[in-house]
Image (cartoon, rainbow, N blue to C red):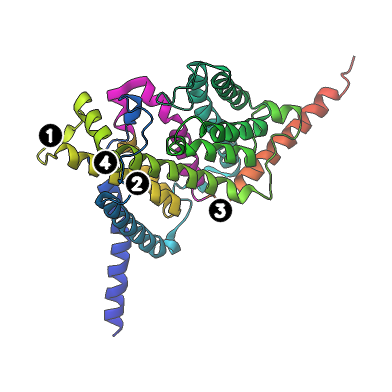
Amino acid sequence: MRRQENKRCRWWRALARALPLAVCGVMLSAPAASAHERWFVDDGDRAIEPGAVFSWPTLLALGVIAAAIGLAWGADRLLARRRGAGLALDRLGIKTLDNLYAWLPPVLAVHAAIPLLVSGVSLHLFAPNLGLPRNLFGGLLAMAQIIVAVSFLYGAFTRAGAVLLAVTGLLGMFFFHPLLVLEHAGLLGIAVFLYITGRGPFSVDAQIGRLGHPRLHLLPYAVPALRVLTGFSVVVLGFTEKLWNFELAREFVRTHNFNFTTATPFPLTDNGFILAAGLVEVTVGALLISGLLPRLVILAALVPFNLSLPFFGWPELVGHLPVYGAMVVLLIWGGGQDLTPYIRSVERAEAQADVDGREEARPRAA
């Protein structure tokens, strides 16, 4: 009896190790690339094809998402006892770990600031496909993005910049279809994260007072908000640019000859390629929303989310920067449960600032 139980335990342990590897393998081998079709193909203001929501690709996507979340949940439960820092970050030492966490808000802020600045000066809202009208209202929304970008870059009045970014997105829904704006919900996640954490010790806010200090009562929600809204934006993009908009995706694939599976031993039709790409995208987004194995999901998504960069260059890179910033935060902070390193990083920086201030105020010997 005990031998049978031991065999079952060994079998479950092997399954626990195999499931994450299988998830990685599927993500890495899937014929998918997270290119933004609307940035390179004119689709007007149409968000989705009529009747697409209640179509068979939607049912298939829901089934794949449910299966992926079920597998991730099983792997998460089986690996719970062995879970550590995930990347052995605890071996870096307390001081090094604190400094690493202290850099997360600046890294995320810069990754969001660059595309906002580019969109603002080119009279777009968040992305090249959302062209703002050449009037006072369009100019104000563009200027708001520039102000937010400068605020995030320098870390000056960061919380006000985060609120302004959220308001800008809300106002954008009066100019564009709400789904087209929700494709950029990850920016709202960044705004929420920076509003809660502040810009951190490396900012103008930290130098002029305690504006860089985190909102401690909200800090447990910072990483989950970033994770959920980033995942939501990925899910929306998978539906609106692929599964609910095959005509747009087909035009994009044919115009740019982007179905690279044709040169492989397992070629797919254009529709099959679009379906596979959309399913991978919505699955990655749903797994991020679920919060299951976030570091593993990020690592598995690196290849499909970067594969389009060599083909579409700087516009694709700039547009993807907010997602990259969120990936960095989630890869290091994981699920966001451990708040101690970030709190310590802020306290350490403030203590060092106090020491520096006392040394400067100390009268020098003649």
The relative height of residue 104 versus residue 364 in the rendered view (above or below) is: below
* Residue linked to disc 1: 262
Please provide percent x and percent y for residue 180: 42, 35
> Which numbered mark, 1 or 2, is in the foreground of this view?
2
Amino acid type at circle 4 is: Ala
- Magenta span: helix, strand or loop, mainly? helix
Distance from Cα at disc 1 to Cα at disc 4: 14 Å
Q: Is label 1 in contact with label 2 (beta carbons under 8 Å)?
A: no
Q: Secondary structure at mark 1?
A: helix
Please provide percent x and percent y for residue 251: 23, 29
- Part of the protein shown in magenta: 306-335
Q: Residue at x 75, y 35 (%)?
A: 210
Q: Residues within 10 Å of mark 1 (few under 14, many from 20)?
A: some
Please provide percent x and percent y for residue 284: 36, 46
Q: Secondary structure at mark 4?
A: helix
**Residue 282, labelled with which disc?**
2
Please report whichever mark, 4 or 3, sits nearer to the chain's N-terminal start. Answer: 4
Amino acid type at circle 3 is: Gln
Q: Residues within 10 Å of mark 4 (few under 14, many from 20)?
A: many
* Residue linked to disc 4: 277
Amino acid type at circle 1 is: Thr
> Which numbered mark, 1 or 3, is in the foreground of this view?
1
Distance from Cα at disc 1 to Cα at disc 2: 23 Å
Q: Secondary structure at mark 2?
A: helix
Note whether residue 30 is visible: no
> Which numbered mark, 4 or 3, is in the foreground of this view?
4
Please report whichever mark, 2 or 3, sits nearer to the chain's N-terminal start. Answer: 2
> Which numbered mark, 2 or 3, is in the foreground of this view?
2
Q: How many marks?
A: 4
Q: Is residue 278 left or right of residue 325?
A: left
**Residue 337, labelled with which disc?**
3
- In the image, 212 versus 248, the foreground residue is 248
